Image (cartoon, rainbow, N blue to C red):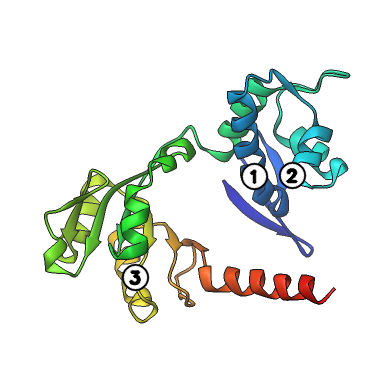
Amino acid sequence: METEKVGKRKYSINKDRSLVILKSTLSRLPIYYCYLQEVFEQGIEYISSATIAESLTLNPVQVRKDLASVSTAPGRPKKGFRTEQLLTDMKSYLGYDNFDEAVLVGVGGLGHTLLQYPGFSSYGLDIVAGFDSNEMLHGKRVGGKPVLSMNKFTSFVKRLHISVGIIAVPSPQAQAVADLMVESGIRAIWNFAPTHINLPHGVLIKNENLAASLAVLSYELSRKDQK
């Protein structure tokens, strides 16, 4: 999937379907997907865009447009979309049915948790190994995944053609780890270190700043208390 900028808006292009979709829409699709999984497990065969919008507190017109951009079958009058088909369409569009193997660097508290989390497989991600500079961790397994020395990182990534790297190290180490990942052939980085990372053109990065998210939550809570 590629991105393209038209005017001030960024679009994501899915070559398989020749669809153009707003980046803002792409950010909402995983939210719909998680909700639809819950609905499907409850045995609900059909779901309307209005029901989804109400459950997720979203604009119903926006939800209807979002679903129309990825659904291969229109919703039925008074019934809505077939839940299983909508899940399949969304899974295909988001690439959850194409597994990407990833490696994680930094098997501390957060890294340890990420290695143990079994839910990534539902979203097409398989963390195959963790890497750390702490010799005490080498040779151990976390969540069934081996923890290896950083000295083995490049050869491991190149041998298995790994394309995704996860950074879970302290901020001062993040840039060096990112540089190593790029040199080893990593093409996409999921960064949990609360710092800016410089990357060459063509390498994708998604930053998860937990401290910033907490600050926003605290700010919104204080505003609510003042009302």
For label 1, the SS is helix
* Residue 73 screen position, x and y as percent: 74, 21
Q: Is residue 177 left or right of residue 74?
A: left
Rate crowding at label 3 as few (under 14), some (14 to 19) or many (20 or more) other CA atoms within 10 Å: many
Task: Give the spatial CA distance, label 2 vs label 3.
Answer: 33 Å
61 vs 162, nearest the viewer: 61
What kind of element bears circle 2?
A: helix
Answer with left or right where residue 76 lies relative to residue 157: right
Displayed quadrant of residue 150: bottom left
Q: Amino acid at mark 2?
A: Leu
Residue drawn at 68 percent across, 48 percent down: 28
Count the marks: 3
Q: Amino acid under label 3?
A: Val
Q: Position of residue 133 (x, y in %)?
A: 19, 70
C-alpha gap between disc 1 and disc 2 = 8 Å
Do tag 1 and tag 2 residues touch (Cβ < 8 Å)? yes
Residue drawn at point x = 43 percent, y = 43 percent: 120
- Rendered position, 63 above or below 213: above
Packing grade of label 1 (10 A; few <14, some 14-19, many >=20) is: few
The residue identified by callout 3 is 169
Q: Is label 1 or label 2 in front?
A: 2
The disc placed on residue 56 is 2
Find residue 180 and report its image quarter: bottom left
Of marks 2 and 3, the one in the foreground: 2
Asked if marks 2 and 3 touch (Cβ < 8 Å), the reply is no
Label 1, label 3: how many angstroms apart (C-alpha)? 27 Å
In the rendered structure, find residue 31 and report the number of the disc placed on it.
1
Mark with earlier residue (1, 2)? 1
Q: Is residue 132 above or below residue 47?
A: below
Disc 3, SS: loop
